[in-house]
Amino acid sequence: MPYARQARAPGRRGGTARGNDGTRTPYASRAQVLIAWASEPFDPSPAWTDVTGYVRFEAGISGQRGRQDQVSAISAGQLTLTVDNSGGEFTVGRSGSPWAPGVKIGRRIQVNVADQSGGLHTRFDGLITELPAVWEGPAGFVNLAVIQAADILAWLARQPGLLSWTQQEMLADAPAALWSLADGSNVTSASDQAGRGAAPLQVVSQGDGTGAAAAGAGLPLAEIRTSGTVAQQQQTQTFTFTAPGSFTWTAPPGTLVVVPG
């Protein structure tokens, strides 16, 4: 349907839209479009700007969310609408915009639809992903902007996957190193998850259960190595008495002493 530009009062844009029957319907009675130009995307109290008067409702507002059937995956919600940009208000980077320098992708947008009693209900809430300028008319003299947006699911899909709750809890404490031993079953080292440059843990030796405790043989003795330092996880010392007597031995703190019967 061709669009005829109309004279508007100062400070007001696109107050009415012409329907197929020639009647005019106030924009505010159909939907409300808000954009938080001056707020960060996840600001808990965004400063909304009502841009309903700029919306070209005759071009339609298209949206999609949820899933197409019961077995399909839930996809991110999508929104597309067209606004009048004859004054350059929606041009990214234009200092003359009344909302500069906040006119950019990533800003939050919300579409509210009125029910029969006039109460508004949110039908879309997401972030602007595209804000291209387009031209309309025989000579291309009408400047428009096509706003495309996606909801929070699109943002979440770009984030790294969550680890187990224990790993997430430990990482939240910003440790110098974290070896959660969540590596695959066939690996020969344990990688650090803290991301601060700690070397991986590597198995140096494993005892075979016979003879004295020593690296590479004897009772179980596992050693791990990181940053050039070897730490013994288990070490066993055995004392055998062939005759009654006494002896002196200094054990380090934390030593477990077992005397078989």
Image (cartoon, rainbow, N blue to C red):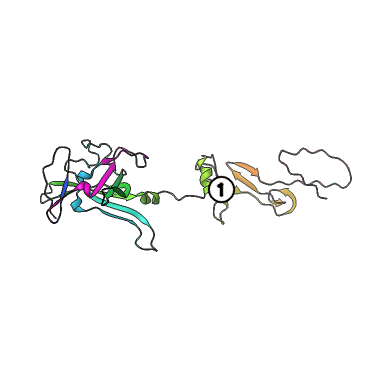
Q: Is residue 97 left or right of residue 124?
A: left
Instruction: Using the image, determine if residue 183 lies above or below residue 13.
Output: below
Q: Is residue 31 magenta?
A: yes
Left or right of 166 in this view: 77: left
Q: Is residue 68 above or below residue 222?
A: below
Q: Amino acid at mark 1?
A: Ser
Residue 151, horizontal then vertical, whole percent:
34, 50
Nearer to me, 217 or 85: 85
Q: Is residue 119 left or right of residue 181?
A: left
Taking the magenta stretch, the answer to whether it contains residue 158 is no
At x 31% / y 53%, what residue is drawn? Answer: 78
Callout 1: 10 Å neighbours few (<14), some, many (20+)?
some
Residue at the spot 54% in from the left edge and 47% down from the top edge: 166
Residue 129 makes an appearance in the image = no
Q: Residue furthest right?
A: 244
**Picture quarter containing residue 19?**
bottom left
Residue positioned most to the front: 117
Identify which residue is drawn at 56% across, 54% down. Answer: 187
Q: Which residues are magenta?
A: 21-49
Question: Which image quarter: residue 104?
Answer: top left
Name the residue carrying label 1. Answer: 180
- What secondary structure is found at the residue carrying circle 1? loop
How far across and how far down the image is residue 217, in percent?
A: 71, 52
Q: Nearer the viewer, residue 10 or 138?
A: 10
- Tally the numbered discs: 1
Residue at the (36%, 51%) spot, across then down: 154
Where residue 71 sits in the image (x, y, percent)?
A: 40, 64
Quarter of the image with the N terminus is bottom left
Residue 221 drawn at (x, y percent):
68, 49
